[in-house]
Image (tube, coloured by chain):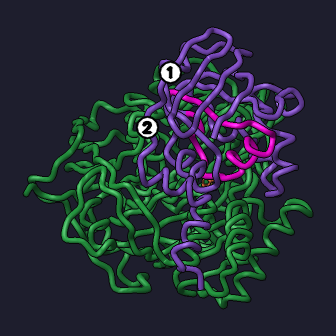
């Protein structure tokens, strides 16, 4: 899978309340959630981000609550993937479970500026900063997680295993 | 072979293995799977989408609509309705509605639904609270919850364990909340990322079960997968009489392997205040300075238990909250509510000018029942002070223990409990 888009750069410890504020959690409708994606971090982000754009963030992205509304909102707003120095544990798990591509690379994050055009090859883990003509390798995705992605997420994988009664 | 930590033992047992080691991927059987009115609707949607007909075990799937209840608006009423209908359809044993609702992580231990030795997952990050009983419990997402509702199992990566050893006597106003704020202040909000935090030492052995719950509750605020305390006599005294099932007490082996170990002398730890906008921005109460506060909240899955209300009642007795400061007290469960009322604390709270809320998450996540306007400042006994956590993105939240909260409500600025005691 190849992805391409403009980078939206964010700082460290972006918590799930900033990705999707709790005041909007009285619904789980992806379209509704997308309207408020990153609102408290960058008001109007939902209107500005183009389909395929990427979120590029410092360490511990997605810390805080377990709300799957966070990766859902990011996906529904059209963001193609998130590149961060590191991810909070539940956000990492949720992203794989529901199919939001995420990559870890401290070097890439440091070398990508806001609005740079970035290409990502999810299969090889290569991150290419088109604007600056620089290439980086993301931390490899563990084989087990890769299996989940290939199966189409956690629910599809248990379906394939015949575990749904 | 080296020894195992309590976390490794519980995971191994539930995976049907003799032993496990950090980094290993396992599939484990789940004792309790929890969802709330925010996370369960998505799990139920996934459950139905997968074509599942039956939950794996109606005793083990627990639904607690506690966040936006009593329903704050039409949308949240619809979310709760999804839970209610699902609970009826699958005849769930543990569904708490109306006057039975309490904040989930206070309610489940109180009802004996989670017990020592359990493997618990919850689609709520503060599921780590049950580590206080010696259970392995961790927060997951809604899709994980759906998978467990269908299969009764879930994949885990066995975490490394960090050991936190507390010795010495706790100061007068110091509680489990201060110990964990102290640790987070030191290691940061990702200081225990992907890891289990094990709390032990002579000070932990004397800590009340409620303080232990506050301590384990905020393990997630250090990025941890779980927090845990080995069960002892205090745990047994709490669990016996309420446990719904037989339980098993595990302990770490003497030669268990830890990726990190830290020692703390509790006599040197002061009450802590976490400044906006991260729980790691901690200061000692003596270094806080003059910070006026518009609203004080005493409640939540961190500090809304009887012990917490007792401290508040003690300090508020015969006193009034400052004119410009609103005090909201939220007993975490119906039982705590009834006990506090019976003890006469409601009189104290009401005379002090406090608002007493029914059990709910309410303002803790900026849901309802006490939302902040732009520029307003709250001090809360809750666990997160992220941007906009309690209302407008331009509002602020400070975190502290219930004694500091009560003193702050009286003084109208962040205050040391000694100032009002
Ligand atoms: S009280 Fe606050 S932290 Fe605890 S479960 Fe409710 S919203 Fe989450």
- Counting from the top left corner in percent of width and height, residue B292 is at 69, 25
Chain in green?
Answer: B
Query: Which residue is the site of mark 1?
Result: A136
Closest to the observer: B167 or B262?
Answer: B262
Q: Is residue B279 visible from the viewing direction of this image?
A: no
Residue drawn at point x = 46 percent, y = 42 percent = A141
The subunit carrying tag 2 is A
Circle 2 — which element? Answer: loop
- Check residue A72 for magenta coloring: yes
- Counting from the top left corner in percent of width and height, residue A30 is at 81, 52
Magenta residues (range): A61-85
Q: Is residue B79 visible from the viewing direction of this image?
A: yes
Closest to the observer: B408 or B86?
Answer: B86
Residue drawn at point x = 73 percent, y = 53 percent = B351
Query: Which residue is the site of mark 2?
Result: A140
- What hue does chain A carry in this figure? purple
> Is circle 1 on the same chain as circle 2?
yes
Classify mark 2: residues with Cα within 10 Å, few (<14), some (14-19) or many (20+).
some
Is A84 located above or below residue B251 in the figure? Answer: above
The subunit carrying tag 1 is A
């Amino acid at each position: 899978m190849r992805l391409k888009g403009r980078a939206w750069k964010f700082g460290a410890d972006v918590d799930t309340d900033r990705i999707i504020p709790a005041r909007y959690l009285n619904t789980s409708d992806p379209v509704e959630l997308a309207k408020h994606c990153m609102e408290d971090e960058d008001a109007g982000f939902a209107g500005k981000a183009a389909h395929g754009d990427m979120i590029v963030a410092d360490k511990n992205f997605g810390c805080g609550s377990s709300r799957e509304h966070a990766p859902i909102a990011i996906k529904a707003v059209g963001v193609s993937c998130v590149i961060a120095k590191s991810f909070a544990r539940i956000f990492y798990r949720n992203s794989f479970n529901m199919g939001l591509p995420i990559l870890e690379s401290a070097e890439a994050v440091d070398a990508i500026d806001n609005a740079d055009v970035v290409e990502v090859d999810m299969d090889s883990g290569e991150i290419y900063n088109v604007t600056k003509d620089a290439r980086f390798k993301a931390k490899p995705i563990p084989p087990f997680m890769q299996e989940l992605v290939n199966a189409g997420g956690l629910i599809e994988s248990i379906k394939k295993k015949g575990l749904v009664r | 072979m080296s020894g195992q930590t309590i976390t490794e033992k519980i995971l191994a047992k539930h995976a049907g293995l003799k032993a496990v080691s950090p980094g290993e991927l396992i599939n484990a059987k789940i004792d309790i799977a929890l969802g709330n009115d925010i996370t369960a609707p998505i799990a139920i949607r996934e459950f139905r989408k997968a074509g599942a007909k039956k939950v794996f075990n109606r005793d083990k799937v627990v639904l607690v609509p506690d966040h936006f209840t009593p329903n704050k608006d039409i949308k949240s009423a619809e979310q709760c309705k999804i839970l209610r209908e699902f609970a009826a359809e699958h005849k769930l044993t543990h569904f708490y509605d109306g006057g039975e609702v309490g904040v989930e992580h206070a309610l489940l231990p109180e009802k004996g639904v989670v017990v020592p030795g359990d493997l618990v997952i919850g689609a709520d990050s503060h599921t780590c609270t049950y580590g206080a009983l010696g259970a392995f419990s961790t927060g997951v997402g809604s899709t994980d919850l759906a998978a467990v509702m269908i299969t009764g199992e879930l994949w885990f990566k066995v975490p490394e364990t960090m050991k936190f050893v507390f010795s010495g006597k706790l100061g007068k106003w110091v509680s489990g909340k201060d110990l964990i704020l102290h640790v987070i202040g030191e290691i940061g909000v990702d200081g225990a990322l992907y890891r289990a935090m094990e709390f032990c030492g002579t000070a932990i052995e004397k800590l009340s079960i409620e303080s232990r719950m506050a301590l384990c509750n905020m393990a997630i605020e250090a990025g941890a997968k779980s927090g845990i305390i080995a069960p002892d006599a205090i745990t047994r005294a709490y669990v016996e009489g309420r446990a719904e099932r037989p339980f098993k007490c595990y302990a770490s082996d003497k030669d268990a392997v830890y990726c990190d170990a830290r020692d703390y002398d509790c006599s040197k730890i002061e009450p802590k205040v976490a400044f906006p906008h991260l729980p790691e921005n901690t200061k000692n109460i003596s270094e806080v300075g003059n910070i006026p506060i518009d609203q004080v909240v005493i409640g939540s899955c961190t500090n809304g238990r009887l012990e917490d209300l007792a401290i508040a009642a003690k300090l508020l007795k015969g006193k009034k909250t400052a004119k410009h400061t609103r005090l909201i007290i939220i007993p975490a469960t119906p039982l705590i509510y009834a006990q506090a009322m019976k003890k006469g604390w409601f009189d104290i709270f009401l005379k002090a000018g406090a608002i007493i809320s029914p059990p709910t998450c309410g303002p803790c996540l900026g849901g309802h029942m006490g939302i902040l306007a732009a520029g307003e400042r709250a001090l809360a006994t809750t666990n997160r002070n992220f941007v906009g956590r309690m209302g407008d993105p331009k509002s602020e939240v400070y975190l502290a223990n219930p004694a500091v909260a009560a003193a702050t409500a009286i003084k109208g600025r962040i205050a040391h409990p000694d100032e009002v005691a």
